[in-house]
């Protein structure tokens, strides 16, 4: 089988996704996570915390819930349905680190969890910082800061 035949076979056997439905589901799930975040922030504010602490606690709560749902095996099931809507917010970051830690926990705390916890999100850190640096330099030196 040559490369052309292989690509045709892959194209034929690859399931087609409904991109409009995926877009809608991602929009709804991402919006729901955002609404939950606003609700948590408001709840923490009503408990007497200032805005900065309320936002911090809201983010920590979302990270904690995503880690818990990953550990229980629920996150992957929900992400299969809602795709980017649940993976793009901070919940996706939490899921990536928690699943990497769970996959390597048998190798021990140092060589397992410690060495592998950020394996899946390393590129996000690297290119996120690179993008932020470039945007800052453009803002400061080209747009006049």
Image (spheres, rainbow, N blue to C red):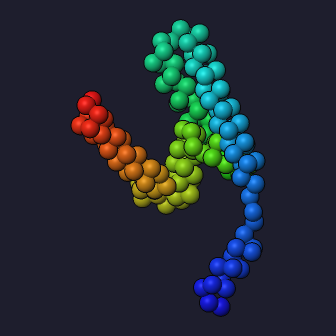
Is 105 left, or right, of 76 in this rendering? left
Taking the spot 69% from the left edge, 76% from the top edge, the residue there is 10
The x and y percentages for residue 19 are: 71, 52
Q: Quadrant of the N terminus?
A: bottom right
Q: Is residue 103 above or below residue 23?
A: below
Please name whichever residue, 82 or 119, is drawn nearer the observer in this view of the structure. 82
Q: Give the image location of residue 71, x and y in percent.
A: 64, 46
**Residue 1 in view of the camera:** yes
Q: Position of residue 119 (x, y in %)?
A: 46, 56
Q: Nearer the viewer, residue 100 or 112?
A: 100
Quarter in which the C terminus is drawn: top left
Viewer-closest of 52 and 113:
52
Name which residue lies at 65% across and 27% down: 36
Q: Considering depth in this image, is 24 or 110 the residue closer to the camera?
A: 24
Residue drawn at x 69%, y 79% as measured from the top left: 8
Q: Position of residue 89 (x, y in %)?
A: 56, 39
| Residue 109 visible, this angle | no
| Farthest-out residue, front | 143
- What count of labels does the image hold? 0
Tell me if residue 59 comes above or below residue 45 in the rendering: below
Above or below, comparing residue 26 to residue 112 in the picture: above
Q: Residue furthest bottom?
A: 1
Residue drawn at point x = 47 percent, y = 18 percent: 53
Q: Quadrant of residue 47?
A: top right
């Amino acid at each position: 089988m040559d490369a052309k035949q292989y690509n045709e076979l892959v194209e034929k056997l690859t399931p087609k996704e409904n991109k409009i439905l995926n877009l809608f589901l991602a929009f709804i799930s991402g919006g729901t996570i955002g609404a939950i975040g606003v609700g948590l922030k408001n709840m923490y504010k009503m408990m007497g915390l200032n805005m900065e602490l309320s936002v911090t606690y809201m983010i920590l709560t979302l990270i904690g819930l995503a880690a818990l749902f990953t550990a229980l095996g629920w996150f992957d099931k929900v992400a299969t349905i809602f795709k980017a809507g649940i993976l793009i917010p901070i919940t996706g970051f939490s899921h990536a680190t928690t699943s990497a830690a769970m996959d390597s926990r048998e190798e021990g705390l140092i060589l397992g969890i410690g060495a592998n916890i950020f394996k899946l999100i390393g590129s996000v850190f690297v290119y996120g910082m690179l993008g932020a640096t470039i945007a800052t330099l453009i803002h400061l030196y080209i747009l006049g800061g």
